[in-house]
Amino acid sequence: SSDLAISAGDDVADLLLHSYDYLSIREVPAWEKQLEVELVGEVRFPGIYPVRRGETLRSVLNRAGGLTELAFPTGSIFTRETLRGREADQMKILERRLEADIAGLGLRAAADPSGNSQQAMSVGQSLLEQIRTMVPTGRLVIELDKLVATDSDDFDVVLRHGDKLYVPHHSQEIMVLGEVQYATSHLYAPSNSRDAYIALSGGLTSNADGKRVYVVRANGAVQASKGLRWFGGGGGEVFPG
C-alpha cells in the first residue's frame, strides 16, 4: 500500500503536504509497552516475568512452576502500584482532617484548661505523627490458597504492570498485640480459640476494650467482633499467620 511505500522511502508514492493538511498517525490497536510482574518467595522459579495484556496470576504462576512444598499461600502478599498511590492520597486526606480536628481541640483546651481537650489533643498529635510516617503498601487482599486449589476464575487476578506477589514460608505462629498483659507470639494449636490465645498472653489489660477485639488474617483480611458475636461467622477461630 502507499503508506508502506512511503515509510520505505519511495519518492514516487510520497505526498506533498500543504497548509491546513492533517497528518494522523494512529497507534496499533491494543498495543502496550512490555508489562512485567514479579514473583518472590516460595515459588519454584521466582523472578520478573513479562505478561500479556489480560493475562492472569494463575497463568504466570503456572509458567513459574507453581508453589514450593513449603509455601504458605494463605499468607501471600500481593501489591499493586496504582493502589499504593490511592492509599497515599487517602492518607493525605486523613492527615488534613486530623490536623483540622487538632486545631479545634487546641482552641477548646485554651478556653477550658481543666477539660479533656488537652488529653484528646495529645492523643491526636500522636496519631497524626503515626499517619505521617506510614508507608502505603498498595496491598490487594487475595485468596491465593483457593486460587491454586481450584480452577475457578472467582479467585484469579488480571495482572497489571508492576504487580508483585510475595509467597512466604509456611507459618506456625499466632501473634497477639495491643492491650494484653504480654504481647507475644504463640505456636498455633488447632484446639485454641481467639480467647485462648489472649489468655496465653496474660489476658486483657484494664485499658482494653473487649468489644473491639479483631483478628487480621494472614492474607490481610480483617475479622471484627462485638463481644462474643463475630461478624462474618467463624466464631473465635484463628488460623496460622
Image: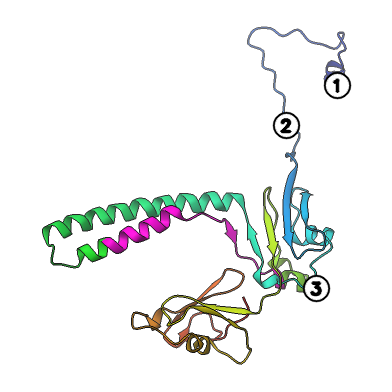
**What coloring was used for the rendering?**
rainbow
Number of the label disc, if any, that sits on residue 205: none
Q: Is residue 70 above or below residue 33?
A: below
Circle 1 SS class:
helix
Residue at which label 3 appears? 69
Going from N to C along the chain, the mark reached first, 3 or 1, is 1
Viewer-nearest residue: 195 or 224: 195
| Boundaries of the magenta span | 122-145
Quick one: quadrant of the C terminus? bottom right
Badge 1, how many Cα within 10 Å: few under 14, some, many 20+? Answer: few
Residue type (three-letter) at the residue carrying disc 3: Glu
Please tell me whether residue 134 belongs to the stretch shown in magenta: yes
Instruction: From the viewer's side, name the closer residue of 49 and 233.
Output: 49
x then y, percent, for residue 96: 35, 50
Mark 2 crowd level (few <14, some 14–19, many ≥20, 10 Å Cα): few
Which of marks 1 and 2 precedes in the sequence?
A: 1
Residue ranking furthest to the bottom: 191
The residue depicted at 22 percent of the width and 58 percent of the height is 105
Residue 7: x %, y % from top left:
83, 18
Q: Which residue is mark 2?
A: 27
Seen at 28% across and 62% down, the residue is 122
Q: Give SS at disc 2.
A: loop
